[in-house]
């Protein structure tokens, strides 16, 4: 019952802490732990190799001592000293037994060293893979963070940020421009504006009549002037007609 409760608390704590985990920090921490384990395994391998070397040296020394006492026993036999020969052989057996024990120990040590070497090679590969994956994940995390930040900025800009401000300012400027145009129209002389418009139409009519008459230079610059000339000519013709009629009347009377 207690173990289940402890597991539940641990799982809840893990979920809570997961929200505050920084991927880069966690990856760096994991890589450092793997590096620490790798260093420890290397030290263990180095120690195993050193122990193996020591056992080899001790084994060789005991073999040499056994050979030495073997020769001494032979010399004692040549001297017909059997008691001394026996003592030499006993010492030789001691060194031989020690050498035999060292050979057994050395074999076990070599097997342990070989296992540690294999473990070291495997761990070095794992650490190298971890380093590569760490670098890739950190780069992906930074890219995702930058993309998220950019999207947040764009969302704020398009929703209630710069775009909305620009649109509101554009509307205000348009309102000011319309108001300025209305004030300018109210401030001008309406009658003067009408005459200017009329004079512009007169210019067009004058050019049109000049084209019909075939002589642009002979046309008067203003249609009003042409109309006045036409009226004067009409009056003159009327006066000439009246004068001619009077002359004919006088002739008839004569």
Image (cartoon, helix red, strand yellow):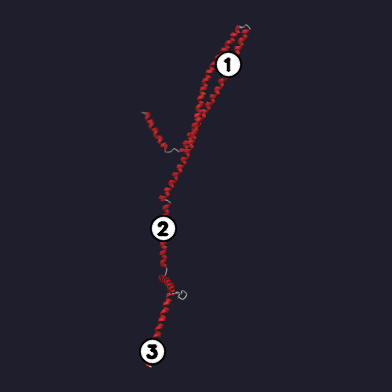
In this rendering, position of residue 77 left or right of residue 149: right
Q: What residue is rendered at 42% in x and 81% in y?
A: 233
Horizontal arrangement in the rendering, residue 123 relative to residue 78 (left or right): left
The Cα–Cα distance between marks 2 and 3, rounded to whole angstroms, is 82 Å
Q: Which of the two discs, 3 and 1, sits closer to the camera?
A: 3
- N-term mark: 3 or 1: 1
Residue marked by disc 1:
63
> Can you tell which of label 2 and label 1 is closer to the viewer?
1
Q: Quadrant of the N terminus?
A: top left
Label 2–label 3 contact, CB within 8 A: no
Residue under circle 3? Answer: 248
Badge 1, how many Cα within 10 Å: few under 14, some, many 20+? some
Q: Residue at x 40, y 87 (%)?
A: 244
Q: Which mark is residue 172?
A: 2
Return the residue nearer the eye: 114 or 39.
114
**Mark 2 or mark 3: which comes first in sequence?**
2
> Picture quarter containing residue 74?
top right
Vertical arrangement, residue 253 with respect to residue 83, above or below: below
Comparing 116 with 227, the one in front is 227
Q: Secondary structure at mark 1?
A: helix
User: Mark 3 falls on what kind of element?
Assistant: helix
The location of residue 30, given as percent across then percent down, is: 47, 34
| Discs 2, 1 touching: Cβ within 8 Å | no
């Amino acid at each position: 019952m207690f173990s289940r409760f402890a597991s539940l608390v641990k799982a809840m704590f893990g979920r809570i802490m997961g929200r505050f985990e920084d991927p880069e920090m966690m990856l760096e921490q994991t890589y450092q732990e793997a590096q620490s384990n790798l260093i420890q395994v290397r030290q263990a391998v180095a120690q195993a190799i050193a122990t193996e070397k020591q056992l080899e040296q001790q084994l060789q020394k005991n073999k040499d001592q056994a050979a030495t006492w073997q020769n001494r026993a032979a010399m004692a036999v040549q001297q017909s000293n059997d008691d001394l020969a026996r003592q030499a052989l006993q010492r030789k057996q001691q060194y031989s037994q020690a050498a035999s024990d060292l050979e057994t120990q050395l074999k076990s040590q070599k097997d342990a060293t070989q296992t540690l070497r294999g473990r070291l090679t495997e761990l070095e590969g794992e650490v190298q893979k971890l380093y590569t994956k760490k670098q890739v994940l950190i780069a992906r995390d930074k890219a995702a963070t930058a993309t998220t930040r950019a999207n947040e900025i764009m969302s704020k800009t398009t929703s209630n940020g710069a775009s909305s401000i620009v649109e509101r300012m554009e509307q205000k400027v348009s309102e000011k421009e319309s108001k300025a145009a209305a004030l300018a129209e109210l401030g001008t002389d309406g009658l003067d504006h009408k005459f200017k418009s009329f004079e512009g139409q007169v210019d067009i009519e004058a050019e049109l009549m000049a084209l019909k008459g075939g002589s642009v230079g002979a046309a008067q610059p203003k249609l009003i002037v042409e109309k006045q000339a036409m009226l004067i000519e009409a009056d003159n013709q009327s006066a000439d007609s009246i004068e001619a009629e009077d002359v004919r009347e006088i002739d008839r009377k004569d």
